[in-house]
Amino acid sequence: MNLLELVDPNATNGVTLVRDKGALRAALAPARRESSSIGLVPTMGYLHEGHLSLLRSARAECDLVVMSLFVNPTQFGPGEDLDRYPRDEERDLRLAAEVGVDVVYAPEAEQVYGEGFATHLEVEGGLTDVLDGDPARRGPEHFRGVTTIVAKLFNTVQPDVAYFGQKDAQQAAVIRRMVRDLDFPLRVEVLPIVREPDGLAMSSRNAYLDGEARERATTLSRALGAAERLARTEGIDAALAAARAELSAAGIEPEYLEARDAETLTPAAELRERPVLIAVAAQVGGARLIDNVLIRP
Ligand code: AMP
């Protein structure tokens, strides 16, 4: 195989765009030969400052930075937004180049899930059938889709460090569990939520919010802020009640608003020695939004 045929000739500003595993292997070969450290940032694209914060950390800490760009169909439920998920590969490549990404791996779905694909990786129970994974919501299949694609990316890229956002707190907890349980030889870094100036957690799905809904969407972070202020002094129940009142005043009925142990995701009725995650999901206008706050004792 000839590397020039494999590496996309549209490479801009030093970013190499690869679309298949062979090209990825070729692009990573020099780094592997030199034992350079490799950082991986998995994304579904339509980049915003949340993604860029992960990429900048990877750039600062690793010799070679790989960003995957793949809207993974298997983590979308039947009624979800796979078809209309926002995409702008050209802009993503430009932004990736600006923050110093070396390689963008943007495969087609057929490349990732070849004919006869039949193997999945599942973190069972507890972590994956609550909150977003509750069968009444996205269901554990969502996380099965996430862990399977992330495990595949870990195997193809073989990073030393993989970067994820606290925005998807449950996803981060599930991936940490997977890495520990299956001895993936890498370090998982989970970085803080990046927000708009008015508090809205950045998300590619914010593109679905029109004027009124965009305004109302700020309620989620305000509600979590109220909960955070009360949790230490008045307790978890009072914190959740305050958050629920904020949401309700804005006409938002959350899919869930819950306090859970940040690592195990078991229900947390009190703030004791361990950090508590207060997580919310709600439909606001055309977007299903999630947000959370981590409360340390
Ligand atoms: P996505 O493209 O939505 O799959 O996100 C890719 C990665 O970026 C995931 O690890 C997310 O948790 C992370 N991420 C998304 N939004 C934010 C945000 N507002 N702040 C920090 N990280 C984020």
Image (tube, rainbow, N blue to C red):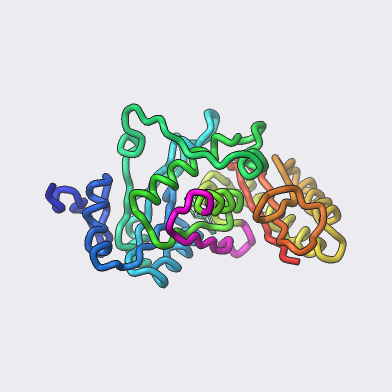
Q: Quadrant of the C terminus?
A: bottom right
Outermost residue to the bottom: 60
Residue beneath the point at 69% across and 51% down? 279
- Is 165 left, or right, of 156 in this rendering? right
Is 71 covered by the magenta stretch?
no
209, 274: nearer the viewer:
274
Does residue 141 lie above or below 92 as drawn?
Answer: above
Residue beneath the point at 56% across and 51% down? 177
Residue beneath the point at 27% across and 46% down? 21
- Specify the segment rendered in magenta: 180-200
Percent of width and height locating residue 146: 49, 43
Q: Quadrant of residue 200?
A: bottom right
113, 194: nearer the viewer:
113
Residue beneath the point at 32% across and 33% down? 114
Percent of width and height locating residue 268: 77, 52
Q: Quadrant of residue 127?
A: top right
**Label total for image:** 0
Percent of width and height locating residue 138: 60, 36
Percent of width and height locating residue 117: 37, 31
Name the chief secondary structure element in magenta: loop
- Whether residue 16 is visible, yes or no, is yes
- Whether residue 206 is visible, yes or no, is no
- Is 81 left, or right, of 242 in this rendering? left
Is 184 covered by the magenta stretch?
yes
250, 68: nearer the viewer:
68
- Is 11 left, or right, of 232 in this rendering? left
